[in-house]
Structure formats: structure tokens, C-alpha cells
Image: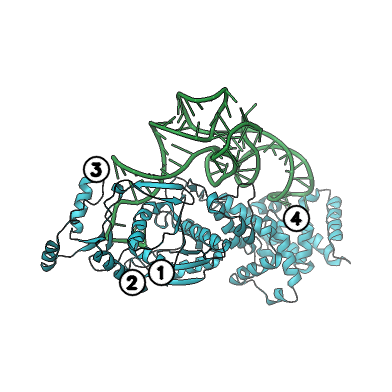
RNA sequence: GUCCCCAUCGUCUAGUCAGGUCCAGGACAUCGGCCUUUCACGCCGACAACACCGGUUCAAAUCCGGUUGGGGACGCCA
């Protein structure tokens, strides 16, 4: 069997969004599974809309996800000569023709057809122009485009889609499409095929929005006498109103970059994306990279489109809840050393990183992460909710402040009292710190919870967290004592 | 308007090809409960779907037809 060769051909007109990322992922998965190659090709023939920043953003997005390619990036505009040569070849062999209809004429016809509720296709006005007529128009300086001449055939044109099954369409439904602009620049339908032929692409996995393009492109393959690749049209990703996801109408919530910036784990996001439209046929929902590569199959991709169920304005579920759930799962089960590297970057950019965390304090650093990660949703939480573990200048959440601290005036005496006892403790251990705290509560005839919860808020700034005495040991005697003694500050005193 | 694709809980889905084991299973979310110094995890439980109508069959979520609904395409964009 020949090597499988797949490609991901984004047009650099914006950032990488989740639909594109999912397409890239499925192509990558299939290439890796079959031991084939994945090619990145930047389709920048729309010079008006393509931008360098966009190219950069797309490559960064793929890098972040860990979707690596074997060839490229190639740039479509580098192969313009080939595209034009192909168009010329088609023209010479009578498979294409020059069309002198102006944009204005075509727009008017389209509008009229729309108004009359008639089909919108090109009416083939220029298809049967004689050589003399063409020469005459050219002599008059009229600009022309090159159109592909859809063969005059009865019956249907079809192909076997690896996801959808057999697809058949009447030839009469296919328009004579433009392959070269009047300014001489080749267009997508042609470029894409010429490049795929040159790159020896064997499998084209792309969105269902390309289905009509596929029909036209099959005709191009035939006219160019090239073997047909396998086609697989993936379901589209829709928004909660069931409209196609697009950069323009949805903004950052659909950008891969947004998830990177929100502290998602790259593999968790891939895992989520993979499940948006595919399942192995069982209940498994967490896959290692190796497992997913092994289990993935085109045939098990769903036919129906999937909704990216993102929410907004919710502090916890700021996107699809399932994406967050999967992220949380990886956050608390992944190798702690790996997590340490990721959190390091977060701490660094927050100015909280200490080099000792990589050396003397490495053990402390990793065990602290292990202690606090259970309650976190993203990598960002380590520097926000978890700030008190790495710095002294943390915020106190107003809610627990009112509920656990300000409610009891006497804490201004109790907590410093506890601090004194902790300071004198011979053995600053889990058991001893807990015993002393409970002892104090008993002496004061209050519930241990009052002391413990107040302590949590004062020491971590949070309403919730790990077991209080684990926190005490982790943060250490000195800081604990200081923070407990400073409780008065919270009551607005000095 | 024309053509194409699709149709199971709010969302992601299993089951559909090879009809019976499905008064439809799992997960997320939601709501209860347990656990607990808090919160989370975990565990237990609840809520919740075969779009509709016909046909075939002893039997249909599964096969067939139609209807409805949703999506996509119809560019000198990609």
C-alpha cells in the first residue's frame, strides 16, 4: 500500500478557530495512524485578505495543540506558475473557455434569479463562443476569466465518501466555474487540486461545506488526468443557535488561542475536539495521544453536525462545560512533573516563579501543586486562586471574608492566640497543628469550624481549599503565624 | 428558489449497516443525598431523548416512503 498523504490547508484570513483545529486534528490523527504524512499548506491566493499575522497565529495554534506536520508550510502563491499552466492546459484541450461576462452582468443575473426564485448558476453565455468571437472580444480589449467547461453528460457524477457514503449528483447541477480571474490570478478550486496532485495527497478530510467543491474538483482531477484521492467530509461545528461557527461572528470564544490563554491543557483540548463529532463506539472519553491515534477512524465520524455548546458570562463555565470538565480531569490526573512545567510558565508570567522550585524546593513545589490542583479548572487558577501558596500579596475573597472572618469580632484575639501556640509548638506537624486548633476551640467553647474556616480564609484568601492542616504544613510555620497575627488588618485596623 | 447533507436526553454521544437482548445505555450540565473543618473530588440517586406520519414485519430507534425541522452550497473567497 502506498503511503497516505494528508494536508491541512488553511487560508490565512484570521486566527485558527476550533472548526479548523478539529479538521487539522482529524487529518493529523489519520496520518499518524496510517504512518503517513501531514502537509501544511497555506492557501494565500486571496492576497487581499491574507495576512502574515494570521499565518503566524495559525502555526502557533497548531504548535500549541501539538499537531505537527511533516512537510511545509508550503505557500500556495509560490506555485502560481503551475496553476496558470494547468489552466492553460485545460484551455488548450477544450476543457475550459474564456468568459467575457462582467462581474456586474453576473451580479445582475444572480439577483434577478434570486428574485424570480430560479436557480442561481451561470447561464453559460460564453461557453460556445467561436474562436473568431473570442479573438474579436480580445482585440477590443475586453477582460475575461477562464471557466471550466463541465462535460456535457447525462446521469450523475459521484464518489464514495468515507464518512457520508455514496454521494451522487446530476451533471446538470454543476456550474461552469471560474478557475482564473480576469487579472490572470488562479482561483481556489484549481489551485487546490493542482497542489493536491503535486503533493500526492491521498486523503482529503475537510468540512461538509466543501461538498459542492468536491464535485467540481473531481472533474478537474479527471481533466488533469490525475488519480482521485479519497474524500471524507466532516460534519460542521455549529454554535448554540445551530449556525456555522465563524471567526467573524463568534470572536475569541472560538479561537484556539483563547483556550491557550485561558489555561487549557493542549491535549485536553484535543481530546475534547476529537469527541466533538467522533466516538469509538464505546463510553471511553479520555484518550492518551497514543490511544486516540490507534482508535480513531474515519468511518466512526458522525454524519450530523455537532454543537459547540459554549456559554458566556459564567465564571466557571466560560465555554463548553464538557471542555472544562475534560480539562479538569487532565489537570488532576496528569503527571505532576509535566504539570509542574506548565505551571512554571504561569508563575513566571505572573512574576511568582522562584528558581528554587526547580532545585532545592522542587519537592515542595510539586507536592504543593498536587495538593491544590484538585479544585482547579485551568492553569490560570494556580496564579489566581492559588496565589497565596506562592506569594504574600494575595487578595482575600470578600465572600468568605464576610462569612468566615468579619462575622466573628473575637477572631482578632483568637487567631493571634493560635499563632502564639503554633510558634511555640515543638513539632509543627499535621497532627499537632490540628490538635492545637481543636484544643483552642474547646477552650473558647466554639466549634472548631469557626477557627478552621477563618484560618483558611486568612491564610489562603479563599472560601474553599484543601484540608486546612495540609495547607498549614505546605505554607509553613513562619507565614502561617504571620498571616494569623495580621487578621486585625482585615477588620480595618492597623 | 435550486441542489446536497443531516435528524436519539439541554449538550456530546452509544445503539442504526447485519430489526427482537432498548418502555433506549454512558458522559457533561442541572437538582437531591452521602462523605467532610470548607470546597472540590469520589460515591449514590433524580430529571431528561428515538422529530412527525404512513408502510414492511410476528416484531422497528433500527428497513422503506413522505412530511417537518436543521445545516451547508449556489463568489472573478478559501
Question: Which residue is identified by label 2?
Answer: A82
Q: Residues within 10 Å of mark 3 (few under 14, many from 20)?
A: few
Q: Give how far across and how far down residue A228 sits, in percent.
A: 41, 59
From mark 4 to mark 1, how far is it between C-alphas? 76 Å
Colour seen for chain A: cyan
Question: Which residue is identified by label 4?
Answer: A411
Colour seen for chain B: green
- The numbered mark at residue A118 is 3
Q: Within the image, what quadrant is residue A140 found in? A: bottom left
- Judge if badges 4 and 1 mark residues of a common chain: yes
Q: Nearer the viewer, mark 2 or mark 3?
A: 2
Which chain does the numbered disc 3 sit on?
A
Q: Residues within 10 Å of mark 2 (few under 14, many from 20)?
A: some
Which chain does the numbered disc 1 sit on?
A
Q: Give how far across and how far down residue A354 sits, in percent.
A: 67, 75
Q: Nearer the viewer, mark 1 or mark 3?
A: 1
Which chain does the numbered disc 4 sit on?
A
Q: Earlier in the sequence, mark 2 or mark 4?
A: 2
Amino acid at each position: 500500500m502506498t503511503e497516505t498523504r494528508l494536508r491541512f490547508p488553511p487560508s490565512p484570513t484570521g486566527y485558527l478557530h476550533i472548526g479548523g483545529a478539529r479538521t487539522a486534528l482529524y487529518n493529523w490523527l489519520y496520518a499518524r495512524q496510517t504512518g503517513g504524512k501531514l502537509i501544511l499548506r497555506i492557501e494565500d491566493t486571496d492576497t487581499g485578505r491574507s495576512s502574515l499575522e494570521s499565518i503566524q497565529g495559525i502555526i502557533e495554534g497548531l504548535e500549541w495543540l501539538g499537531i505537527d506536520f511533516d512537510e511545509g508550510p508550503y505557500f500556495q502563491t509560490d506555485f502560481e506558475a503551475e496553476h496558470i499552466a494547468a489552466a492553460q492546459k485545460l484551455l488548450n484541450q477544450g476543457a475550459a473557455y474564456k468568459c467575457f461576462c462582467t462581474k456586474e452582468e453576473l451580479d445582475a443575473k444572480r439577483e434577478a434569479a434570486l428574485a424570480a426564485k430560479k436557480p442561481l448558476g451561470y447561464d453559460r453565455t460564453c461557453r460556445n463562443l467561436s474562436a473568431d468571437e473570442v479573438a474579436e472580444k480580445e482585440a477590443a480589449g475586453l477582460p475575461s476569466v477562464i471557466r471550466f467547461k463541465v462535460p456535457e453528460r447525462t446521469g450523475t457524477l459521484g464518489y464514495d465518501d468515507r464518512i457520508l457514503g455514496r454521494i451522487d449528483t446530476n451533471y446538470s447541477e454543476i456550474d461552469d466555474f471560474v478557475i482564473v480571474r480576469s487579472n490572470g490570478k488562479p482561483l481556489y478550486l484549481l489551485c487546490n487540486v493542482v497542489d493536491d496532485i503535486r503533493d500526492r495527497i491521498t486523503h482529503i478530510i475537510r468540512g461538509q461545506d466543501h461538498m459542492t467543491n468536491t464535485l467540481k474538483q473531481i472533474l478537474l482531477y479527471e481533466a488533469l488526468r490525475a488519480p482521485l484521492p479519497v474524500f471524507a467530509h466532516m460534519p460542521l461545528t455549529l454554535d448554540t443557535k445551530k449556525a456555522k461557527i465563524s471567526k467573524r461572528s463568534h470572536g475569541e470564544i472560538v479561537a484556539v488561542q483563547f483556550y491557550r490563554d485561558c489555561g487549557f491543557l493542549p491535549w485536553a483540548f484535543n481530546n475534547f475536539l476529537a469527541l466533538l463529532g467522533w466516538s469509538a463506539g464505546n463510553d471511553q472519553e479520555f484518550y492518551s495521544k497514543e490511544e486516540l491515534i490507534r482508535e480513531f477512524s474515519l468511518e466512526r465520524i458522525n454524519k450530523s453536525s455537532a454543537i459547540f455548546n459554549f456559554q458566556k458570562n459564567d465564571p466557571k463555565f466560560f465555554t463548553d462545560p464538557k471542555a472544562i470538565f475534560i480539562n479538569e480531569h487532565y489537570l488532576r490526573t496528569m503527571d505532576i512533573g509535566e504539570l509542574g512545567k506548565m505551571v512554571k510558565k504561569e508563575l513566571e508570567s505572573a512574576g511568582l516563579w522562584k528558581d528554587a522550585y526547580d532545585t532545592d524546593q522542587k519537592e515542595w513545589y510539586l507536592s504543593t501543586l498536587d495538593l491544590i490542583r484538585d479544585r482547579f479548572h485551568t492553569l490560570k487558577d494556580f496564579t489566581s486562586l492559588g496565589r497565596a501558596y506562592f506569594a504574600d500579596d494575595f487578595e482575600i475573597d470578600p465572600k468568605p471574608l464576610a462569612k468566615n472572618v468579619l462575622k466573628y469580632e473575637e477572631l482578632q484575639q483568637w487567631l493571634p492566640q493560635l499563632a502564639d501556640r503554633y510558634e511555640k509548638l515543638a513539632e509543627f506537624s499535621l497532627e499537632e497543628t490540628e490538635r492545637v486548633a481543636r484544643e483552642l476551640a474547646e477552650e473558647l467553647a466554639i466549634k472548631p469550624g469557626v477557627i478552621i474556616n477563618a484560618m483558611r480564609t486568612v491564610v489562603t484568601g479563599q472560601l474553599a481549599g484543601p484540608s486546612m492542616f495540609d495547607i498549614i504544613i505546605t505554607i509553613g510555620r513562619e507565614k502561617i503565624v504571620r498571616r494569623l497575627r495580621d487578621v486585625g488588618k482585615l477588620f480595618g485596623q492597623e
